[in-house]
Each structure stands twice: as structure tokens, then as C-alpha cells.
Amino acid sequence: MHLIVGLGNPGDKYRNNRHNIGFMAADAIASRHGFPPFREKFKGVIAEGTIGGEKVLILKPLTFMNSSGDSVESVAQFYKLAPADITVIYDEIDLIPGKVRIKTGGGNGGHNGLRSIDPRIGTDYRRVRLGVGHPGHKEAVMHWVLGDFSKADREWLEPLLAALAENADILLKRDDNALMNKLAIAVAGDGAERDQRPETADPTRKKAQSHVRAARPKAPQAKAPETGPMAAMLAKVFGKKDE
């Protein structure tokens, strides 16, 4: 059995925040693989199903971000799960929007969700870091992560969530490089680097395109579903595309 944890804050006020991309990923995975509705338990909401033949639990803690460890520890103790059986998905401001990094263990990087989880279950769990970008100034970080994704963000967020859900079986197989490659292709077409500097740091700056990216033909992006539960979830985040 494997536990996938998506981090975020509960309630409509926070639903579309950058800080809630972990919740969005959890919803996308559960929807894509036909999990039953989430039920309230373990200080969170949890759904149980199978992905690639493996039994999987998907958890969204309802304790607010700073106390996420309370919910994760409750599930881990009840199901007797080791840190190696747990994957946590969360927002990362030190990665450009749409960039993904996966690793096992390490520090909390200042993320309050991980800061709460680490002392409860240890640090040897897997972390899926989904880049949401940096506002450019330390003082603006709190406002940035608790701010909503913009309509323009759908260009990378929709294909990222769709590709992560579609390839969740690779996540369970622990083939991290293969998964990161697939997600990069879905988001950027060829996985080429985006401009590393945050757009919000200097709105007057024009971005220079990589000569490598300019020379290569762009592969088709992963297409977000237009119907079904996942499409409904994305519509709640962004609204209708023709708005």
C-alpha cells in the first residue's frame, strides 16, 4: 500500500491558491484513476483505490498547512506505513512555474507543511515538488503562495496536473527520472528550460528565448480533459476558457 499526500489549506478561501497545488494534484490523480469520493477521516479527507494494480490511499489533510503532520501521522500509524510508503506533493517557490523535482529525504526547505510532517514520521519519505515560481522578493512570498493562480497559469498548470495524474503509475514505480521527463514534455513541449528569473521581479524585463528551444519543433502538450470529474475540478480553479 502507498500513501499519496497532497498538501494545501481547506476551505473555499484557499481553493485556488498556489499553496494548494498539492490538493489539486491529489484531486486530479483520484479523478483520473476512478477513486471513490473522499471521506473525512484522520483529520483530513481520504480516498482509497488502485493505480497500476497497487493499492493506494490519497490524503488531503484538513488541519491547515502548518499542522499537516497531524493528519499524515494518523494515517501512517493506522495503516502501519513506513516513510518509504509515503509520497508528499506540494508547492515549491524555488522552482519556476511548471518545473518538477522529485527526491527522497532532505530538509524542509522552509515549507511549513514539511516542517510539520518531518518530526511526526521522519524525513525519508518522497517529495514531489511542483514549481509555482517566486515573487522576486522575500517579503512578498506569503502573499504570493496564498494568492490564486491566474488565468494565464492554466497554460502550464492544466497539462501538468493532467500528466501527473495520467502517469501516477510511474510515480508508484519510483522511476522519478522518467516521470519528470514526461511532466517536462507536457508542460514545455520539449522540456527546455524556461527563463529562470521570476516575471514578477521586474515586469518591464523581456525574456530571452533559449536558442536551443527556438531551434527545436515543439511537441504537442498533454491535453487537459474537457469532460468528466477532472475537467470539473479544473473549471473550479480557472473558470471556463472562453471567459
Image: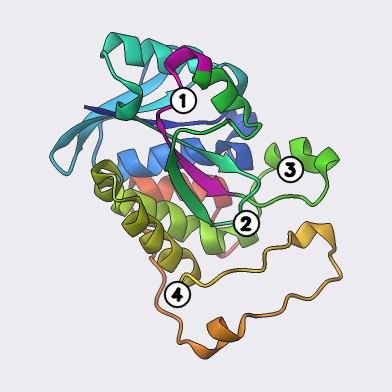
Q: Earlier in the sequence, mark 1 or mark 4?
A: 1
Q: Nearer the viewer, mark 3 or mark 2?
A: 2
Question: Real-space Cα distance between discs 3 and 2?
Answer: 13 Å
User: Do labels 4 and 2 touch, CB within 8 Å?
Assistant: no
Q: Is residue 28 left or right of residue 236?
A: left
Q: Residue at x 83, y 71 (%)?
A: 205
Which residue is identified by label 4? Answer: 190
Which residue is identified by label 2? Answer: 96
Which residue is identified by label 1? Answer: 123
**Among all residues in the image, which is located at the extreme bottom?**
215
Mark 2: few/some/many CA within 10 Å (<14, 14-19, 20+): many
Residues 140 and 120: in front is 120
Question: Real-space Cα distance between discs 1 and 2?
Answer: 24 Å
Q: Is residue 137 left or right of residue 74?
A: right
121 inside magenta stretch: yes
Above or below residue 121? Residue 160 is below
Q: Nearer the viewer, mark 1 or mark 3?
A: 1
Q: Earlier in the sequence, mark 1 or mark 2?
A: 2
User: Which range of residues does the magenta coloring cover?
Assistant: 119-131
Q: Residue at x 53, y 90 (%)?
A: 215
Mark 3: few/some/many CA within 10 Å (<14, 14-19, 20+): many
61 inside magenta stretch: no
Q: Residue at x 42, y 47 (%)?
A: 232
Which residue is identified by label 3? Answer: 144
Q: Is residue 157 left or right of residue 26?
A: right
